[in-house]
Amino acid sequence: MASSNTAGLKPASLAMLLHISRTRSRALFRPRYRLSARLDLSPEERQAIYGHRIDRYEIFYDPKRDELVQRAHQADQRARALPWFSLSGERMLLNAGKDWLETIRYIGFMIRARAAFRLTVGDLVRGVTITNAKLAAIRQIETAITETVDHLNAAVEAGLAFDHQREDVLAPGEDDQRIPPPAWPPRSRRW
């Protein structure tokens, strides 16, 4: 996506605009990087995003979430591997305690995984500010946002096509040429 500075109104040829601003500040002894991103949409595009639930699409999430989910499933497997019934009451009580401990670990890891950082299309529509101490992390998030805009525009266009019940006819041998319905050749019958 090509970047440009827009000082006023949104050109009619552009479907949506992504506004990104970057700032740096000092917090204690190290820099803090701040990335603000917001989508500028027409009312029709905004309605398509919310109407087709495109706002729930995930753009970026913290890779730590995968590790937490994996650790939660390992705790669950350890809990399931414990025998429920044993000959002695003391052994059974010990296994029940281990089962509870692994279940608590599972719940804790899953809560932490759900609370891990994630960025959705809805966040971009509302506007989001991300702050991090590492420049590489901010650049990774910015790259994910800028690469997603073209895909998001295509998803919105597809949603609008269904809203307007648009029909496309593709000519054979030509990849991108679309013939609108009024220009279709008349049907002739040979009967």
Image (spheres, rainbow, N blue to C red):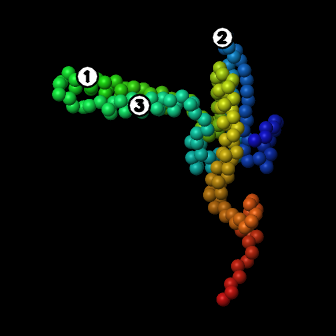
Sequence order check, earlier mark of 1 and 2: 2
Cα–Cα gap, marks 2 and 3: 39 Å
Choose top left, top right, bottom left or bottom right for residue 175. bottom right
Farthest residue to the top: give it: 29
Q: Amino acid at mark 2?
A: Leu
Whole-percent x, y for residue 9 in the image? 80, 41
As drawn, the label of residue 43 is: none
| Residue highlighted by disc 1 | 94
Please name the residue shown 42% across and 33% down the image: 73
State the CA–CA distance, disc 1 to disc 3: 20 Å
Residue 101 at what x, y percent from top left? 34, 24
Give whichever of discs 1 and 3 has the lower sequence position: 3
The residue positioned 66% from the left and 45% from the top of the image is 152
- Label 2 CA crowd tier, 10 Å (few <14, some 14–19, many 20+): few
Q: Nearer the viewer, mark 1 or mark 2?
A: 1
- Pinpoint residue 56: horizontal percent, then vertical percent: 56, 42
Q: Residue 74 got which mark?
A: 3
Using a 10 Å C-alpha cutoff, classify the residue at mark 3 as few (fewer than 14 neighbours), some (14 to 19) or many (20 or more): some
Kind of residue at badge 3? Gln
Q: Is residue 12 left or right of residue 70?
A: right
Camera-near label (2 vs 3) is 3
Q: Is residue 105 above or below residue 160?
A: above
Which quadrant of the rendered structure holds the N terminus? top right
Q: Which residue is mark 2?
A: 28
Pick whichever, 53 or 154, lies toward us. Answer: 154
